[in-house]
Amino acid sequence: MRALFSHRRWLAGFLVGIGGWVLYVAALRFAPLSLVQAVSAGGIGLLALLADRPLPVRERTGVAVALAGLALLAISLAGGSSSGRQPPWTHVAAWIALSVAAAAIAAGPPSRALAAGAGLGLAAGILYAAGDVGTKAAVAGGGRLGFVPAFLACHGLAFVALQLGFQRGGVLATAGVATLLTNAVPIAAGVLLFHEHLPGGGLGVLRAVAFAAVVAGAALLAISFRRA
């Protein structure tokens, strides 16, 4: 931790990331979790366009898939967007508790059967996703602000797991798996836990394809960036 926070470039990036997270929380106050997470995941494609080096095939593919997903997502909004509803607090608490347990298992002895860093990557992705679920619940205000300590703890533990994964081996496995779960699980939680319905007919199919595309594009780019 001392090495990270004493590195100026890393610290600057970390602070910018915190600013992005604040905007993410604000977006959750007004829009469905699945929709906000999909837009956030697809944004990595825009980042790749700013790269100061020629993009290899994997990165170009990731950019194309992610941006195509964002375009499809925009088109699907013509059918409106269901804001869903807040589930009972017990359901949210159970989701977070099960996520923490799953992360502990992923980072524990079973991780020895995986590539170095992959278990911690799984744990980080699950915990970041749990933090996003807790955030969506907390923005409703009132008694649900009690989820604030829970989602902060999840994000903190996820950060530690991710950094440990980078230090202990496979940065490729760590980043790729973490990115996939961080983006995919909150979208699933939005539909299953917060009852955020897709539009009817073709627009609903279009949005489902968009969700899949932005997650796949983000995962491809994460794998490629860490390999480089």
Image (cartoon, rainbow, N blue to C red):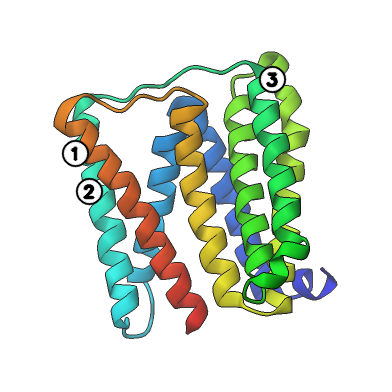
- Label number found at residue 75: 1
Please identify, in this view, whether the residue under mark 2 or under mark 3 is nearer the observer: 3
Q: CA distance from mark 1 to mark 2?
A: 6 Å
Q: In the displayed structure, would residue 36 be above or below residue 52?
A: above
Q: Give the residue drawn at x 45%, y 26%.
A: 30
Q: Give the residue drawn at x 65%, y 41%.
A: 131
Q: Is residue 17 left or right of residue 112?
A: left
Do the numbered discs 1 and 2 sit on residues whose CB atoms are within 8 Å?
yes
Which numbered disc, 1 or 3, marks the residue that appears first in the sequence? Answer: 1
The residue under label 2 is 71
Which numbered disc, 2 or 3, marks the residue that appears first in the sequence? Answer: 2
The residue under label 3 is 90
Three-letter amino acid code at the position of disc 1: Ile
Do the numbered discs 2 and 3 sit on residues whose CB atoms are within 8 Å?
no
Q: CA distance from mark 1 to mark 3?
A: 35 Å
Q: In the displayed structure, would residue 90 be above or below residue 74?
A: above
